[in-house]
Every structure is written in C-alpha cells, then in structure tokens.
Image (tube, rainbow, N blue to C red):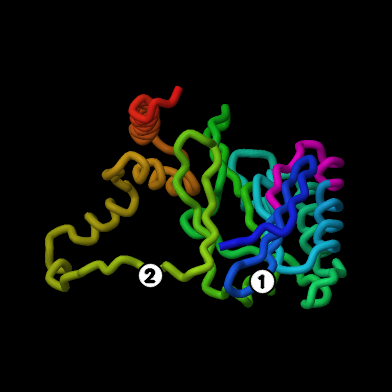
Amino acid sequence: MFSLNSSIKYQNFLLLSWTVKGCGEIINVLSVYEPQKVVDKRALWARILSAMHSLDGFWVVLGDIDVVRCAEERKNSKYKLRCARDLNDFIHESSETKSRSKFGPTSSLCEYPLKGSRYTFMVNSVKGKKTSKIDRVFFCHEFQNKWSDASLCRLPHRFSDHNPLLLLVADLNYGPKPFRFFNSWFEKPNFEMVVAQALESPVFEGPTNLVLMAQALVLEDRDLDEDEEWIRMQCKKDLEVLEQNKAKDEGRN
C-alpha cells in the first residue's frame, strides 16, 4: 500500500515518509515517545516543527505523548499546566510552519474524536486507578479533507498499561447495534426499577477481553467495587494463562 521515501531516526521520535500507491499522496508519519523532563519535551516539539518544515505532504503525529491537553483528560493523577500549555502551543505553532508542500503553509494539527473511551492509559496507584489520555494521534487538516470518513478507535489492552489506537481511513462504523423494544414491557411489574438497576449495576459477562474493556469504561466515571476488582484481576490472570499456552504451542520462549 505504501512506498517508503525516507526515514529519520532521532532521539524520542521516528519519522517515516511514504507515498500511497494508487493516488501518489505523500504521508509523513512521525512516531513519538516523549521524554519526561519539561525542557526535553519543549526541545522535542521544536524538532518536530523543524521536521514538518522540511518535508512535503500530509502529516500524522502519533505515539506516547505523555501529556494531556486539559485537566479533564486525567483522573487520580497530577495535571501539569505547563506541559499542557507547551503541547497546545506546539499544535498552534504547527499552523505557522512554512513548508514546501503544494498545500502552502501547513495547517494546524487536529485530532479525531476517540471512539471507545476517553482515556488510553490506566495503572494502579495508592489513590486508586490512574487514567489519562496520553496516547494521541494528531493529523493535518488536509489529511482529514482527503479521508473524511477516517476514525480513531481505542482497542482493548492485554498486558500493557496503554491501549492500542487504530486509525482507520475507511468508514466501518455501521452505527449502534439494533435493539428490539416491546411496548408491552411497560406493563411489566417493576419495569422502571429493573432498568434503573441495570444501568447502575453493569454486569460483566462474555469473553475475558470484553469484560476488561467494559470495566475500563466504568473506571472512567468511578472506582470499581471489591467484586468488580476481583473479576478484573481474575480476567487478567486468565489472559496471562492463555498467552503462556499460546507461546508454548507456537514454540516461543
């Protein structure tokens, strides 16, 4: 699907420039693993802006950004205003980057709404489950105009604290699954009470990975109770056993 034009390896990022076969469009994909120190973060944003100045084509910047853009993107963890301001300034300054692209000045980077969850990272702490949106995918407006049906989805995680993100350039969302509702249900005894209890007390059933994904959604709004936490830990153990058995069957160490 792609033909590699060039690659640039630098501390904390890898830049690959591709040509899409069939349409000839150039896409520059820059994969980031952000450093911890504030001064190093700022230096990284400056290097990325310099890279965007040097290459033609569409831009996609993605990876473990390790920074949120607003306080609402963190739960049970410290919000660093300075780092958020630096990230937002980088996004704004990207619109002022002059490139040799046929598009002229590069437009400001933007994000697709994240489907499946508000957060991409979860880890245990003394304060409970720490969740945040630190894994991100930015793209230029021209990318969005070219692939207007593209979407960004959060996939279930297995052993990592981070959730994989999937950027699709085809519209595969067929809407919510149909649900048949019968008017006669309104006449059932305690109908409203049953519906209210079902909404307040979600039941986790089904495959282990789906149970973990459902619990991750609940964690966005509240901490798990003792029973739910036990189910979560048991599901993780089951997945570890399955992975170990799979490794044995495939002859992996």
Picture disc at residue 25? 1
Residue 226 seen from this side = no
As displayed, is residue 187 above or below residue 16?
A: below
Q: Position of residue 145 (x, y in %)?
A: 63, 77
Tell which circle, 1 or 2, labels the residue nearer the N-terminal end. Answer: 1
Instruction: Give the amino acid at mark 2.
Output: Gly
Left or right: residue 126 versus residue 214 is right
Front-lying residue, 22 or 41: 22
As displayed, is residue 229 above or below residue 171?
A: above
Residue at the image position 15 percent from the left and 67 percent from the top: 185
Q: Which residues are magenta?
A: 30-43
As displayed, is residue 53 above or below residue 242?
A: below
What is the CA distance from the residue labelled 1 to the residue labelled 2?
Answer: 30 Å
Residue 152 seen from this side = yes
Q: Residues within 10 Å of mark 1 (few under 14, many from 20)?
A: some
Q: Is residue 92 magenta?
A: no
Residue at the image position 33 percent from the left and 39 percent from the top: 208
Residue at the image position 29 percent from the left and 43 percent from the top: 207
The mark lying in front, picked from 1 and 2, is: 1
Quadrant placement of the N terminus: bottom right
Q: Residues within 10 Å of mark 2 (few under 14, many from 20)?
A: few
Left or right: residue 143 versus residue 48 is left
Front-lying residue, 81 or 60: 60
Residue under label 2: 175
Left or right: residue 23 versus residue 203 is right
